[in-house]
Image: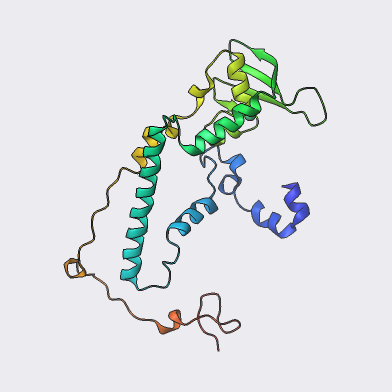
Amino acid sequence: MEAIKNKNILAHRYLDGISKEKWSMAHDGGWRRGVMTTNMSECLNSVLKGARRLPISAIVHLTLLRCVQYFIERVTKGQRMVQENQLWSDYARRKYEEWAKKSSEHRVVKYDVRSQTAQVATGGRPSRGQHMQVVRISTTDCSCGKWTIFGIPCSHAICTAKWHSLDPTTLVQSWYNISEYLATYEGRFEPLADERYWDRPTFELQHNPVRRERRRAGVSDERGQLIA
Ligand SMILES: [Zn+2]
């Protein structure tokens, strides 16, 4: 918070008034799993790009088509991962491989066999850039926070697991399994019938020419309504 305060006092004041778990991964107890609100809205935006300011029926058609296309691409990707005998999705595999490689640069300096806990030093020799992290295998937790956030053992956890003769691949959360990936996209889309067969709406849509007016600088307020 001090770093934010030094950069922008207004931003600090704004964030200070909001519970930290609502905007920070470090304080959310691991519930976001590395996905921030902006990631989710960008994901939806990428699927529905170009579907704004169209007639409502066109938006419904386009949304259906884009979602069907999105699911087809994911199912195809899932089948490719099955053929390549992958254990986890591409995302989890990339992260695990990166951290497994990094784990060879760490070393365990203190450990407790009974509780499978270890203090892990990053880097080879003690230096100013060296950090110490504490890993607890029993509670799937590392002081760096990455294991809790992503559900994938961080480089320190992989190093500790190997030290205790455990297979670190068994510490990756099951939701990254290919079977889970495929189950996410196994839903079916019902074809959309012709408009004549749709249920009659219980409301009436009204055309609002002001809302459809193109915004021009200096002549509209934040709600898009013309001032001049
Ligand atoms: Zn760690």
Numbered marks: total:
0
Q: Quadrant of ligand 1?
A: top right
Viewer-nearest residue: 113 or 29: 113
> Which residue is depicted at the point 75% across and 47% down?
2
Q: Position of residue 135 (x, y in %)?
A: 62, 23
In this rendering, position of residue 180 left or right of residue 134: left
Query: Which color scheme does this rendered protein use?
Result: rainbow
In this rendering, position of residue 110 left or right of residue 188: right
Indicate whether 75 appears above or below 222. Answer: above
In this rendering, position of residue 198 left or right of residue 94: left
In the figure, residue 58 lies in which quadrant?
Answer: bottom left
In the figure, residue 56 lies in which quadrant?
Answer: bottom left
Indicate whether 188 appears above or below 193. Answer: above
Outermost residue, bottom direction? 228
* Quarter of the figure with the C terminus: bottom right
Indicate whether 171 appears above or below 182. Answer: above
> Which residue is depicted at the point 64% across and 12% down?
112
> Which residue is depicted at the point 44% across and 31% down?
86
Viewer-nearest residue: 34 or 10: 34
Q: Position of residue 107 (x, y in %)?
A: 70, 19
Viewer-nearest residue: 81 or 103: 81
> Which residue is depicted at the point 36% across and 54% down?
69
In the figure, residue 210 lies in which quadrant?
Answer: bottom left
Outermost residue, left direction? 197
Q: Position of residue 44 (x, y in %)?
A: 45, 56
